[in-house]
Amino acid sequence: MDNKKDASRSTNHFECDHRMAIEGIKRGQELTNQLKDALGFSATSEPVSKLFHGIHSGLNNALSGLQYASNAPSSKSRESKKNSLEEDSLGVNLRRRNIVASIASPTPHYDGHQWRKYGEKLINNSKHERCYYRCTYSKELKCPATKTVQREDSNTDPPMYSVIYYNHHICNHKSSEYEPFVIDSTNFSTNETSSSTASQETASFEAYASPSMELHMLDEFGMETDQHRYKSLQD
DNA sequence: ACCATTTGACCCGG
DNA sequence: CCGGGTCAAATGGT
């Protein structure tokens, strides 16, 4: 329409800074997760886990703020033959990718949402391919949430995957934005000892999760809950 | 037959 | 033009 590329010009160097800042924060998130893994059981003690929660919240807020600030509408004069899903009914641009969370996990699946794979790509300096998922309800409920999963190059015994979440879910939310979600788990010790034999899901663990807490939850409880489910998915 | 995944082509920004 | 993200027809499983 009438918005030209004027705004992007004046904030050009800011966008550059945003990029660097965002990269730095994402790096911080990854390292925080690695640190928590390295701490093992110690990381589950209340003061320490509160610290991690605080770190996650701070980083996540900073990330959200930066991404929101650098979210200025750019000149959209492109009109290709297939431009069907530029915007949905809510005006959400389905092609814009706003990072919501970035985690490293040995078990990137089953984070409380259903995903549908729509692509797979071998990335330049990576040994493994990156997989692209979108919310199962992206079509019915116009849910814009997507995620990418890529196995990291490091040959750790449980292979680690970098998971990046884009856009918040607008599906399946009932009353609160901070929806509690349930993960069934026998025992959720975060150290890697005796995790392979955990089998029957008898107990259920539930917790309230804020968006920043979600990072914490995903990484911390993803390990064992995913393990048996991952198998059933792959087999 | 239906639905999710696979996979090569296509799109698009840098 | 290249690299990363998405589309959509083909494929496979149930």
Image (cartoon, coloured by chain):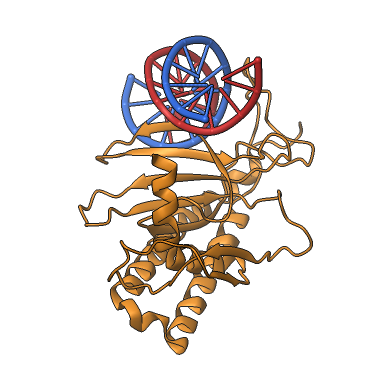
Chain colours: A orange, B red, C blue
Which of the 4 image quarters holds residue A107? bottom left
Residue A157 location (% of width, % of height): 22, 57
Expressed as whole percent of the image width and height from the top left, the position of residue A99 reads: 53, 52
Residue in the picture at 39% in, 74% down: A189
Work out which residue is located at the far bottom of the displayed protein and give it: A47
Q: Nearer the viewer, residue A26 or A10?
A: A26
Q: Is residue A188 above or below residue C8?
A: below
Q: Residue at x 58, y 46 (%)?
A: A114
Numbered marks: total: 0
Left or right position of A192 against A27: left
Q: Can see residue A221?
A: yes
The quadrant where residue A43 appears: bottom left
Vertical placement of residue A227 versus A195, above or below: above
Q: Quadrant of residue A81?
A: top right
Towards the viewer: A134 or A8:
A134
**A205 sits to left or right of A92:** left
At 72% from the left and 37% from the top, the residue drawn is A3
Residue at coordinates 46% horizontally, 89% vertically from top-left?
Answer: A47
Q: Quadrant of the N terminus of chain A?
A: top right
